[in-house]
Amino acid sequence: MKKLQVTTTPSGFAVHPFNKLKGNVLVMLLLFSFLLSPFSFLLFAQRCASPSSGCENKKIFFGVSIGPTIDWFTSTSKDLARKNVKGGMITGINLDINLSKSNAFYFSTGVLVRYLQGDFSYKKEYDFSGISLVDSLIQRPTVTTYQTTYLTIPTGLKFRTSPSKNCVFVGKLGLYHNIRIGGKQYDSFTLPNFDANPNEYYVSTPKIPNDAAARFAESAYIGLGFEYSLKNNFRVFTNVDYSCQFNYFSSKAKNNITDKQFKSIVHSLHIVVGILF
């Protein structure tokens, strides 16, 4: 049998009550989105007077966007189970280049920064040799939280309807090419002596660099959007996109009991607002 690998030592453990956990960041991000998105809909009352006022699609659009994401991991290996749906963030610059005479089809790209987090529950083995009166190696039900920052390059196609009363509807699909540029991970589990009341206290390990996430990851996305054209074709927009990341874990991410590699895909819902010019 292969020797067990211990990835965490008790020297850095910190015990916290559950009732002191911070609120979910997803609530704040969604509130931010809902506060901004009504701005575009307040402009419906304006009318388009002439093409010079921005009532036709341009050849090239530059954009800036920001918004929250709702992310959930789905395991493709039997020893992992998703614990929670998490909130993240995506922001960056966008570039759309026209591909048709009608200014309806565009090649869409840009540079985005994406913050993703998620967690899994599973059994993990810890070395408690520094704590007296317990066995040195103990298996505990564990939740590992993964936080990842990606540099993301989208490549896709975007369809724009012709402006009607300054309103444009958008459909899009394509790929996200994700490059991991940072991230942290940490474990949470109950101490062996607290099995009688596991919800009172838990052990939280220090955050360490996230080497469980693959350096490169591909995602497919599809989405719908709305744009409102102002003077000189300056536009405000909002999008709702769904993306599926085909892989998350690197080859280093393994169960230290069974030595099996972790496997997972990531589903995400993006709610984005921004400007085009």
Image (cartoon, rainbow, N blue to C red):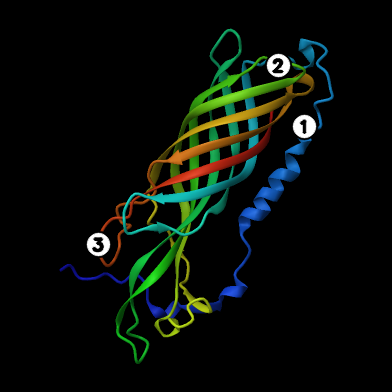
Q: Which residue is mark 2?
A: 163
Which residue is drawn at the image coordinates 64% and 30% (left, top)?
63
User: Is residue 120 in view?
Assistant: yes
Q: Amino acid at mark 2?
A: Pro
On screen, 44 above or below 130? above
**Residue where numbered disc 1 is placed:** 41
Q: Earlier in the sequence, mark 2 or mark 3?
A: 2
Residue lying furthest bottom: 133
On the rendered structure, is 55 left or right of 206? right
Residue 227: % across, % down: 69, 26
Give the residue at mark 3: 259
Label 2 Cα neighbours within 10 Å, binned few <14 / some 14-19 / many ≥20: some
Verify CB contact (< 8 Å) between mark 3 and mark 1.
no
Q: Secondary structure at mark 1?
A: helix
Residue 6: mark in rendering:
none
What residue lies at 61% left-to-right and 24% top-to-bottom? 170
Kind of residue at badge 3: Asp
Q: Out of 172 and 155, give the one closest to the viewer.
A: 172
Q: Position of residue 99 (x, y in %)?
A: 53, 14
Q: Is residue 70 left or right of residue 257?
A: right
Give SS at disc 2.
Answer: loop
Image quadrant occupied by the N terminus: bottom left
Could you tell me if residue 277 is visible in this image?
A: no
